Every structure is written in C-alpha cells, then in structure tokens.
Amino acid sequence: MGVLHVQAGARDANGYDRRQLVDRPVVVAVSNPQPVDPPSCADPYVQAITIRAKEPIVPGSAVQAQIGGVVRLAVALDDKGTPKHAWIIRSPAVILNTPSIDSAMNSTFRPAVFRCKPVPSGYIFAVEYAD
C-alpha cells in the first residue's frame, strides 16, 4: 500500500510561500480510499480576508518627493488570522517598504478555512500610496 502526501490549503503554492513559516494541512491518500464525511458547516472552504487594514505612516520624504504607487506584500497568517511574517513582492520605492510591512503586520485578518477549520495560510496584501 503506497501513501501519497499532498499539500493542501486555501490557495495554490507559489514562489512566495515559505514552507518553514506556514504549516499547511496535509492530506494523506492511501490506495484503499475511504469515504470522507461531508463538511459540517455552510462554508467549508474560505480564503483569508482583511478585516481591518492598518493605515501606514507615510514617510515625509516620500511625500515631499511625490513617491507613490502600490506595494504588494506576501503575508503569512496563522490559523487565527494573525500575521506572522510579511515580505515585499513588488514595490515602486524602497522608502515605502517598511511602512507597508508595518501596515500588514498590524492589520486584522480572518483566517482561511479548510474543511470547516481555520488553517494557516498566505495572503497577498497591497498598500497604495498617492503620488
């Protein structure tokens, strides 16, 4: 009997996932499959969402230089929706990175749900700065 381990989660893995930061549920498939109980809730699979985004503190030098644009971050959430790590995916200017990370880490999220249970997950967070 062979065993196959499959990574599962509320979204597909990508280049921004850091396996050591977010443990994903593991589904074990065996050669003699057994029936799986139907989900016990109305929404068994739900993606993580932002409940309250923390307003970033814009550096005065960025305002004076009229630096703006969208900073995209990857955020690792635990099963309670608490941000554990955040890193920059794309940024128009380095000066906007730290306030964007602070914004993500101090925002409130609802965790992803997999088969009716909250699970650790990743989330793409964007902060837009006017120029």
Image (cartoon, rainbow, N blue to C red):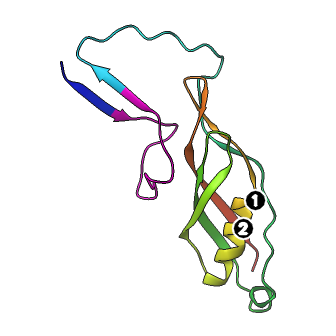
Q: Which circle marks residue 22 in the picture?
A: none
Query: Which stretch is magenta?
Result: 6-27
Callout 2–callout 1 Cβ contact below 8 Å: yes
Q: Is residue 52 above or below residue 41?
A: below
Residue 93, located in which quarter of the rendered image? Answer: bottom right
Reading the image, the residue beneath label 2 is: 102
Q: Position of residue 90 (x, y in %)?
A: 54, 70
The answer to whether residue 6 is left or right of residue 32 is right
- Residue type, mark 1 in image: Asn
Q: Residue at x 49, y 41 (%)?
A: 11
Helix, strand or loop status at disc 2: helix
* Residue 22 vs residue 57, the one in the foreground: 22
* Residue 40 vs residue 49, the one in the foreground: 40
Q: Residue at x 63, y 41 (%)?
A: 48
The magenta stretch spans residue 98: no
Q: Position of residue 63 (x, y in %)?
A: 79, 86
Label 2 crowding class (10 Å Cα cut-off): few <14, some 14-19, many 20+?
Answer: some
Q: Residue furthest left?
A: 1
Reading the image, the residue beneath label 1 is: 106
The answer to whether residue 49 is left or right of residue 120 is right
Q: Position of residue 20 (x, y in %)?
A: 45, 53
- Residue type, mark 2 in image: Asp
